[in-house]
Image (tube, rainbow, N blue to C red):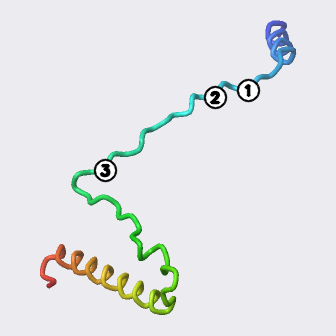
Amino acid sequence: AAPVAEAIAARSAAPASPPPRPAAATTPPAAPRPDQPAPAEPGPAAQGPAPGQDTVAWIHQRIMTIQRERETRWQKILKLLPGVS
């Protein structure tokens, strides 16, 4: 019982230090895959209306652009499904 008591006393006498932290892993950004298109960057239409441009007309034009993009994406998806055209 004495060795156990000595071990407990030695542990309690030593200052508790936090466990060492692992080094922060720095992972390089993932390279674009060749089978996937590069992510589209927002074009000038996504930036907002130009000075002097009618805001309502710009919003209408932007909505129409997004609607066309959405429709073409659905068409691409439907082409992948067999028996649906």
Q: Secondary structure at mark 2?
A: loop
Q: Which residue is mark 3?
A: 32
Q: Nearer the viewer, residue 41 or 35?
A: 41
- 22 relative to 2 in the view: left or right: left
- Identify which amino acid the numbered label 3 is placed on: Pro
Screen quadrant of the N terminus: top right
Q: Are marks 1 and 2 in contact (CB under 8 Å)?
A: yes
Q: Amino acid at mark 1?
A: Pro
The single residue placed furthest to the front in the displayed view is 52
Q: Residues within 10 Å of mark 3 (few under 14, many from 20)?
A: few
Question: What distance separates the C-alpha of mark 1 from that of mark 2?
Answer: 8 Å
What residue is shown at x 59% (from left), y 28% (from top)? 22
Could you say which is closer to the camera, residue 30 or residue 51?
A: 51
- Residue with the mark numbered 1: 18
| Mark 2 neighbour class, 10 Å CA radius: few under 14, some 14 to 19, many 20 or more | few
Residue at coordinates 27% horizontally, 60% vertically from top-left? 37
Q: Nearer the viewer, residue 14 or 81?
A: 81
Left or right relative to 35: residue 28:
right
Q: Residues within 10 Å of mark 1 (few under 14, many from 20)?
A: few
Q: Compared to 31, does 78 lie above or below? A: below
Secondary structure found at label 3: loop
